[in-house]
Image (tube, rainbow, N blue to C red):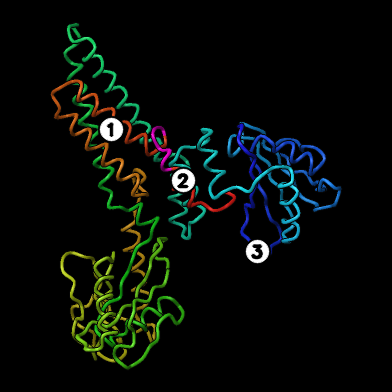
Amino acid sequence: MDGPTIFAPMTAAGRGAVTALRLSGPATAAAITALAGSLPRPRMASLRSLRSAEGDMLDEALVLWFPAPASYTGEDVAELHLHGGHAVLEGVAEALLAQGLRLAEPGEFSRRAFLNGRMDLLQAEAIGDLVAAETAGQRRQALRQMEGALGSIYDDWSHRLAGVLAHQEALIDFPDEDLPPEVEAVLARTIASLRSEIAGHLADGRRGEKMREGLVFVIQGPPNAGKSTLINALAGREVAIVSAIPGTTRDALEVPLTFGDAPVTLIDTAGLRETADPVEAEGVRRARARAAEADLLLVLRSPDTPEAGEETAGAMPRLLIATKADLGAPAAEADLAVSARTGAGMAALIARLDDFARAATATAGPPPLTRQRHRALLAEAEMHLARARDEAEPELRAEELRLAMAAIGGITGAVGVEALLDRIFGDFCIGK
């Protein structure tokens, strides 16, 4: 509450009807009074004339006042809803700078909200995800995390771990007392139960991370199998050059799409074949590399290119698509046949891609992990619980339990996260 007072636009740069400016900090009330003449009633929009220190009219704006601690940051906060002209914003900003306020850094409002106890780190990260959400699935996942669905799970684990550690400390501090024999048994059962729950949470197929970061679908096949035509049809625009000349596509072409409410990067790759052309050979190498990282391979065959054109092994999900169905009978082993030129089979293909994306990002039951940071800390907590379970020395077991608690606390920001704050909030936009 004693730090500098900051301000920043909450709306995107550029011309628009309204620009919203947010202020936060101890000098907010004085700044609004200087601009608007007086403070409006809390949480009531008030139309005010804004003037500079010299008395020049800056704008007719809506002013909202949120006194601490019941505000977004936990500090005194105000919002100015200005007309969207650049000159208006510039004039108001100059007036605020003249009063000693400074421009906010990326994520600084949310960082202050975290430091003032208005949210935990999980909720702060969810706000960043919500701002960046591009699909309905991403929006739902971010809102669920922002409402505390993940935090409540980790808070429960921390509470239970604290109880286990208290029992363990009692066994250490009073070794000669006649403590109930079931204390040791309850302790062991709780450690085993917590470790099992954390392991189950980690084994979520990375569904939350896939929803947040997006899936990758790679189109693969021999030259002239219809890869570029298919990606153009799925994208609804000309992404790739279509040519009868083999080797036209030399690099991986990416287009962002949405299937099953999940973000998907659809990639068209160079046709797989042996070639003496060094540029095409590099394209083939990149095609194989991208295929190895794909969540789903769309393997294409056509009547005039019957060879498979894929060289990936293992159990990677794939969909064998017979293309150019208007030119001849599709391969018997194909999962479905399409003609991107006539549109035949395209609805069925899109439905299959929707189904795969939904299954890969399904979040029925407890909310999934959404970041590698969470996963790493939970894996660390599970490791310490496993060591605590196997440790015979009471003092060493207690230390393992404390380390497990610290790892879980690091997810929500309860302990030891100062080094993470710059990285987490630095990814936010200005004004958030």
Q: Is 418 one of the magenta-colored residues?
A: yes
Q: Are marks 1 and 2 in contact (CB under 8 Å)?
A: no
Identify the residue shown where x is 67% and y is 52%. 20
Quadrant for the N terminus, please: top right
Say whether disc 1 or disc 3 marks the residue closer to the N-terminus.
Answer: 3
Q: Nearer the viewer, residue 22 or 34?
A: 34
Q: Nearer the viewer, residue 321 or 86?
A: 86
Identify the residue shown where x is 54% and y is 38%. 113
Q: Label 2 amino acid?
A: Asp
Residue found farthest to the bottom: 245
Label 2: state its secondary structure: helix
The residue where tag 1 is placed is: 404
Q: Nearer the viewer, mark 2 or mark 3?
A: 2
Label annotation for residue 422: 2
The residue where tag 3 is placed is: 14
Say whether disc 1 or disc 2 marks the residue closer to the N-terminus.
Answer: 1
How would you rate the neighbour count of disc 1 (Cα within 10 Å): few for under 14, some for 14-19, many for 20 or more? many
Label 1: state its secondary structure: helix
How would you rate the neighbour count of disc 2 (Cα within 10 Å): few for under 14, some for 14-19, many for 20 or more? some
User: For the magenta stretch, what is the residue range?
Assistant: 414-420
Q: CA distance from mark 1 to mark 3?
A: 48 Å
Q: Nearer the viewer, mark 1 or mark 2?
A: 2
Q: Nearer the viewer, residue 99 or 241?
A: 99
Q: Is residue 370 above or below residue 308?
A: above
Q: Label 3 amino acid?
A: Gly
Q: Give coordinates of residue 245: x percent, y percent.
A: 32, 93
> Image quarter for residue 325?
bottom left
Q: Label 1 amino acid?
A: Ala
Q: Give coordinates of residue 400: x percent, y percent.
A: 23, 29
Identify the residue shown where x is 32% and y is 83%. 250
